[in-house]
Amino acid sequence: MMWIPAHVLCHILGIACSAYLPNQCSPDPCHKEGTVRCEDLKGDFYCECKPGWQGKTCEKDIDECSVQHGGCNQICLNKIGSYRCSCYSGYVLRDSKTCEDIDECTASADICGEARCKNLISSYKCLCDAGYKYDELRKTCQDIDECEEQLCEQTCVNLPGSYTCHCDGRGGVKLSQDMNTCENIIPCVPFAVAKSIKSLYLGRMFSGTPVIRLRFKRKQPTRLVAEFDFRTFDPEGILFFAGGHQDSTWVVLALRKGRLELQLKYNGIGRVTSSGPLINHGMWQTISVEELERSLVIKVNRDAVMKIAVSGDLFTLDKGLYQLNLTVGGIPFKTKDLILPINPRLDGCMRAWNWLNGEDTTIQETIKMNDKMQCFSVAGRGSFYPGRGFAAFNLSYMQPSSGNETKTNWKIEVNAVIQPATDTGVLFALVTEEASVPLSLSLIDYHSTKKLKQQFIILALENTVVSRLAINLCDEREHSVDILLKKDQLSLSVDGKAGESELSTSELEDSLSILENSLQSMVKTYMGGLPDVPVTSTPVTAFYHGCMTVKLSNKALDLDEALYKHSDITSHSCPPVEADGLSCDL
């Protein structure tokens, strides 16, 4: 038998059956969580679903995120019967669906501490100046010690926010283009440094000792005959000595104030005579000394300039032989024991010499074997610094005050006329006993703070550049460099153009005060280079290479008067810049 629902049966029979049907919403067939209400349809029911629900009994959740992401700008989160929009980290929901970036730098002014805050999309970043790194814990900028990263080939100095590399200039190297590695200092201007094997350089020994020593022995009485060609720009020094020992008979031919001077000692009596033209003009001339029976005759270019009456012979009889000592470029005893003391050092050149009618063939062979005994083929005025060694002086720059003797003034006034062969080197410097460099004037080929390759002349107090001037150091020209430092003044100029100051007024005053303190203690003056000082004590430590003449307070500085001078530095002669077709024959 088939069962028929009551409302269908009533419909078939044509009778009203509503009074006999139970309430279809009781018990409630709808899903309670998803239903607003249940409606009895008299034999059926209707569940009115809440938003976000569907199904006959509102039992199914609608996933709004599946349709156009729920309209959400970033994240859609479906919920039972609902959904919501959300944002990624660093964004905020401005309305129910749209996300906007959070500007953390504005929202929290102290979010980065002492660092700079930079807003990023969905985030932010704390930034420090170059050379510093951000410490998230302390919210501070900490200096990066670049030296730990071994960026420099040689010496590294860490600085706040930066670092500097240093190369040992005394070893012939300088910073290369990358400011980290070192490269050789190579001449950019070639000088005609060729030498002649037919010449004899008299200035090789800074000690003033002779460059040649000869001893002649004869069985018969013999007289001195000497002749040679001579060239010099030097006003003072010894050409040669001839005779016995200090207390016997002897003569010394020298230069003083550019003229020939003859010192002689016969029978214990000394004399000094000077005559003739100025001969320190750099031109070749022939000089001769001849011992006659009762006189000595000195000639310049065959013209007699001195004739001195003498009583005795330069050759002395000893053990049956007539003997004579002859030394060139110095004397065999101390110069203070001369009749009139003289600076023996002579930057001069001999050629075509003839000692006692040419009986000295070994000299030429010796010179051929040693180029340091040879002269430049061509030379002009000036001092030549070969890129090694320096000259040192013991000079004072302190001056008693005219008004009060207890106070002292000081002044450093230097003029240097230079013709560089390289773009790096020390021209002038002061060095203390503690090996600090309170003042230096140098050539350099880079800007230390900008780390930019460019040629400069710089003035530095200790390791700080206080003034600089950009200049082409490889233009083969002479340049006049002037510095003036006093208690309240500092200036640098090159060819009349003033250098740029690198310090504020207060910084300059502090630096000059430190310099003044150094000047009151023991300082030495160095030309063309530095002694063994720390490579970080001054911007440049390389030796100068090229020609240079120097005046201190308008007085010419004579390298022959130095405490010490490297033997390869020529004090009064400098070769010219090499040119095509230049003749180098003597």
Image: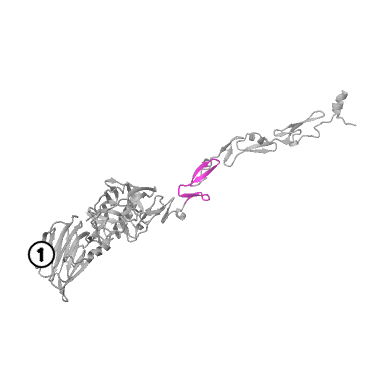
The amino acid type of the residue labelled 1 equals Ile
- Residue 162 as seen in the image, left or right of residue 253: right
| Residue 207 appears in the figure | no
Give the residue at the far right of this rendering.
Answer: 1
Which residue is at the front of the view, 98 or 335?
Answer: 335
Q: Residue at x 88, y 24 (%)?
A: 13
Q: Main secondary structure of the magenta part?
A: strand
Which residue is at the front of the view, 108 or 182?
Answer: 182
Colour mode? Answer: one colour
- Give percent across and percent down for residue 265: 14, 68
Q: Quadrant of the N terminus?
A: top right
Which residue is at the front of the view, 71 or 490?
Answer: 71
Q: Residue at x 55, y 40 (%)?
A: 102
- Residue 218 as seen in the image, left or right of residue 90: left
- Give percent across and percent down for residue 490: 30, 50
- Give percent across and percent down for residue 80: 70, 38
Query: Which residue position is annotated with label 1?
Result: 308
- Residue 101 as seen in the image, left or right of residue 12: left
Q: Quadrant of the C terminus?
A: bottom left
Magenta residue span: 114-143
- Kind of element beneath mark 1: strand
Q: Is residue 555 magenta?
A: no
Q: Residue at x 13, y 64 (%)?
A: 290
Check the image and report above or below for 407 versus 358.
above
Tell me which corner region of the image, top left, top right, bottom left or bottom right, holds residue 388.
bottom left
